[in-house]
Image (cartoon, rainbow, N blue to C red):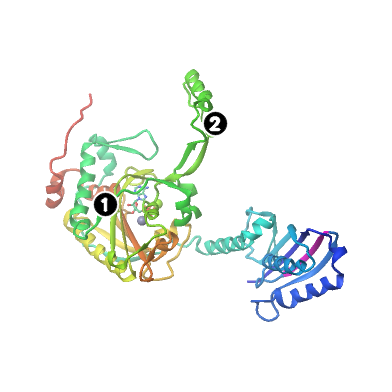
């Protein structure tokens, strides 16, 4: 891809250049930069160049042009460094620099229009070129903001290729056909029987004793048949997730439209809140605007469940002999601001999930994913007696970073488990099994004593989804449920009656 960079900057020095350094000395310095310093690392004939320079008192103005090999902002940092050494001989230092103008042009598809970009003053798109005028200072150059803008543009270009294409989905396995005993929406039926009631919040339900018993039965089956035999131990993962975790997990790249945001008061000082309290007391209205000005966002509620666990291992080295590590969490709810697809207990804003995490070397992680898959199949066949299928899909951690396609390594990826809902004929994802490669250990700096690569996998068992699938295919009458399931569930409790 063709790229051109043009940067105008001014270096401010601690003393007057025009008085101390001769023009010919500076000209020689510029020549040295143009032949060596700004060509280093670039193919022959490529790199950056100081196209113009001028000295005025304590300032030296520079115009640097480049191709993509030594980008002009890199060139400027190199020049600053060299110039510092050069001026040192004359006992002058560099005080700072000012970026007057930074223009980047690159070849660009006509169809992909851009409206706004961070640190960009002006965007022009014409004749197959994208022209950006950047608003950057020395600090943003040191933070490599221009490189990140270019990477962002590459991301956008990549995303455009996937737009309109269907998400990756490849059938891996189909279960036997099973008899269905129900053709209605199970949520409707549960409401009718008083098993559940919509809660006060969006996509949130209150589960009565019957529905709760079903969830606990599903957990029991998972524990007895999968987690305990495999030697899993229970942990408690945090349910509030600060941004520092989502930066590492990649969620900070895309979670915004779906997050449940968490805010804390700017201060606990009751006086600071007095006006809010008073307003409520006299109006009976909660003054949201007044509250918004007094709180600040610190992160969000549990979305993917496993990311905050990794802080437990962050920065540690572990001995090889404790592998594989197998832990799970079922300590709380997950939250997603779902779109219009919100439906019954199938798609919720607040849901319950058992999250299973295993950690080991590459072979162990891949091997255990296979063991889990085999065990899950037995559970679905023998206890739930459902009809389902399994598909190889875009890994969940890529989806949640806003990416499409498949992982680079074919061992890394996600299997979605889907079951058909007879009442709608639609397939519903009810859980997944995912090999996440070295992503998490790497992002959270967890190392293995032997130096071997550490891998991990996770599997999310959505309790509402398992229940929906079971009830949609078999109905709500226990005598239609599989005997093995019935023996664990026992008698459904009856507590409430309403007049
Ligand atoms: P879907 O495509 O159905 O929205 P997803 O791909 O967003 O699912 P994941 O991000 O892979 O789901 O989450 C793992 C598991 O969490 C899912 O298999 C499902 O069991 C559960 N889950 C996710 N979103 C919801 C939701 N809104 N309501 C209930 N369960 C959910
Ligand atoms: Zn996970
Ligand atoms: Mg989803």
> What main secondary structure does the magenta stretch of the protein show?
strand
Residue 1 percent location from the top left of the image: 63, 71
Can residue 293 be found in the magenta stretch? Answer: no
Q: Which residue extends farthest bottom?
A: 44
Residue 494 percent location from the top left of the image: 17, 34
The image quadrant that residue 344 belongs to is top left
Q: Nearer the viewer, mark 1 or mark 2?
A: 1
Residue placed under numbered mark 1 in the picture:
234
Q: Is 423 left, or right, of 23 in this rendering? A: left
Residue 149 percent location from the top left of the image: 61, 60
**Residue 434 visible in the current orientation:** no
Q: Which mark is residue 460?
A: none
- The segment highlighted magenta reads 58-65
Neighbour class for label 2 at 10 Å: few (<14), some, many (≥20)? few
Numbered marks: total:
2
Q: What is the secondary structure assignment of the residue under circle 2? A: helix
Q: Is 218 left, or right, of 54 in this rendering? A: left
Q: What is the secondary structure assignment of the residue under circle 1? A: strand
Q: Judge by depth and name the residue closer to the eye, 199 or 479.
A: 199
Can you say whether 93 is above or below 340 in the image? Answer: below
Residue placed under numbered mark 2 in the picture:
289
């Amino acid at each position: 891809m063709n790229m051109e960079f043009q940067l105008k900057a001014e270096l401010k020095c601690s003393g007057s250049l025009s008085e101390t350094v001769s023009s010919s000395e500076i000209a020689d310095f510029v020549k040295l930069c143009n032949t060596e310093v700004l060509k280093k690392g670039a193919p022959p004939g490529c790199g950056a160049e100081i196209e113009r320079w001028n000295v005025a008192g304590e300032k030296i103005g520079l115009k640097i042009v480049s191709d993509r090999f030594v980008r002009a902002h890199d060139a400027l940092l190199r020049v600053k460094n060299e110039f510092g050494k050069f001026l040192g001989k004359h006992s002058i230092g560099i005080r700072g620099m000012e970026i007057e103008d930074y223009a980047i042009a690159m070849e660009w598809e006509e169809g992909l229009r851009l409206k706004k970009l961070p640190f960009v003053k002006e965007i022009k798109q014409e004749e197959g070129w994208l022209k950006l005028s950047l608003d950057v200072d020395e600090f943003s150059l040191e933070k490599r903001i221009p490189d990140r803008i270019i990477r962002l543009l590459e991301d956008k270009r990549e995303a455009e290729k996937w737009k309109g294409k269907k998400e990756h989905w490849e059938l891996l396995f189909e279960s036997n056909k099973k008899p269905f005993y129900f053709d209605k929406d199970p949520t409707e039926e549960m409401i009718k029987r008083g098993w559940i009631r919509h809660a006060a919040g969006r996509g949130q339900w209150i589960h009565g004793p019957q529905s709760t018993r079903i969830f606990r039965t599903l957990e029991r089956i998972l524990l007895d048949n999968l987690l305990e035999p495999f030697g899993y131990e229970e942990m408690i993962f945090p349910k509030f997730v600060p941004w520092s975790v989502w930066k590492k997990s990649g969620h900070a790249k895309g979670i915004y439209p779906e997050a449940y945001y968490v805010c804390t008061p700017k201060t606990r000082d009751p006086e600071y809140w007095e006006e809010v309290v008073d307003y409520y007391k006299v109006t009976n209205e909660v003054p949201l605007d007044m509250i918004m000005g007094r709180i600040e966002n610190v992160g969000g509620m549990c979305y993917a469940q496993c990311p905050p666990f990794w802080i437990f291992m962050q920065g540690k080295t572990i001995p090889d002999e404790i592998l594989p590590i197998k832990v799970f969490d079922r300590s709380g709810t997950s939250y997603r601001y779902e779109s219009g697809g919100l439906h019954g207990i199938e798609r919720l804003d607040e849901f319950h999930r058992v999250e299973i995490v295993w950690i080991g070397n590459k072979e162990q992680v891949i091997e255990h994913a296979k063991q889990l898959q085999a065990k899950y199949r037995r559970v679905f066949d023998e206890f739930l007696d459902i009809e389902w299928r399994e598909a190889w899909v875009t890994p969940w951690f890529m989806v949640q970073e806003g990416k499409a396609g498949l992982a680079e390594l074919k061992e890394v990826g996600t299997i979605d488990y889907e079951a058909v809902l007879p009442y709608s004929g639609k397939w519903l994802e009810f859980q997944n099994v995912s090999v996440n490669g070295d992503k998490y250990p790497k992002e959270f700096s967890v190392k293995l004593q032997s130096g071997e690569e550490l891998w991990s996998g996770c599997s999310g068992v959505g309790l509402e989804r398992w229940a929906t699938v079971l009830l949609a295919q078999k109905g709500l009458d226990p005598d239609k449920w599989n005997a093995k399931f019935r023996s664990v569930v026992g008698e459904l409790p009856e507590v409430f009656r309403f007049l």
